[in-house]
């Protein structure tokens, strides 16, 4: 990045700090320090639970309430599969691994009666009591729907 590019980049970062709304790709957050993000809306299916968790983690870094929404339809999975098939350099084993990760994400999106927080934390090897979500001040959508 040249001197001019660096100046432009610095100005963009400063402008972003007072931004009210931003539409971004998955690269959002790389080098951006904006802890007061209130909403993250996924317009497409993330390729894995790990990616989803990282992307969703952009919201609420200031420890204030934040919301993450996934706009999901069954056909979204076929887009991810197509993207994985067209990915450059995918060998058979890495494709299988990427497909398994994408299927886990699809299953997460299609949860109907299991706590989303519990599912996420179990994926990462953490224990979580669903009652903490169900009876907490900010239950996930499945706990809210199942127990209200």
Image (tube, helix red, strand yellow):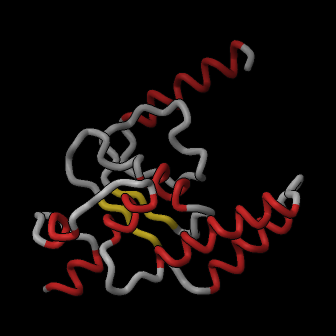
User: Compared to 124, does 69 lie above or below?
Assistant: below
User: Residue 133: x percent and y percent?
Assistant: 19, 67
> Which residue is painted at 12% across and 65% down in the image?
136
User: Residue 113: x percent and y percent?
Assistant: 32, 85
User: Residue 56: x percent and y percent?
Assistant: 43, 54
Q: Residue furthest top?
A: 3
For residue 86, which quarter of the picture? bottom right
User: Compared to 148, does 28 lie above or below?
Assistant: above
> Which residue is painted at 37% across and 86% down in the image?
112
Image quarter in which the C terminus is found: bottom left
For residue 101, which quarter of the picture? bottom right
> Which residue is painted at 30% across and 74% down in the image?
115
**How many marks overall?**
0
User: Residue 64: x percent and y percent?
Assistant: 20, 47
Q: In the drawing, does residue 115 fall left or right of residue 132?
A: right
Image quarter in which the N terminus is found: top right
Q: Which of these two is toward me, 48 or 35? A: 48
Q: Which of these two is toward me, 15 or 44? A: 44
> Which residue is painted at 70% across and 69% down in the image?
99
Q: In the drawing, does residue 112 fall left or right of residue 136?
A: right
Q: Which of these two is toward me, 13 or 98? A: 98
Q: Which of these two is toward me, 76 or 90? A: 90
Q: In the drawing, does residue 1 fall left or right of residue 12?
A: right
User: Compared to 140, does 57 lie above or below?
Assistant: above
């Amino acid at each position: 990045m040249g001197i001019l590019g660096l100046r432009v980049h610095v100005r963009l970062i400063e402008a972003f700090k007072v931004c009210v709304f931003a539409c971004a790709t998955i690269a959002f957050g790389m080098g951006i320090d904006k802890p007061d993000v209130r909403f993250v809306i996924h317009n497409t299916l993330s390729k894995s639970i790990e990616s989803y968790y990282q992307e969703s983690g952009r919201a609420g870094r200031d420890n204030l309430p934040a919301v993450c929404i996934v706009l999901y339809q069954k056909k979204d999975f076929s887009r991810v599969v197509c993207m994985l098939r067209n990915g450059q350099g995918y060998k058979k084993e890495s494709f299988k691994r990427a497909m398994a990760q994408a299927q886990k994400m699809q299953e997460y999106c299609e949860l109907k009666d299991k706590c989303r927080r519990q599912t996420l934390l179990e994926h990462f090897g953490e224990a979580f009591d669903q009652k903490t979500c169900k009876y907490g001040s900010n239950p996930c959508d499945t706990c809210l729907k199942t127990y209200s």
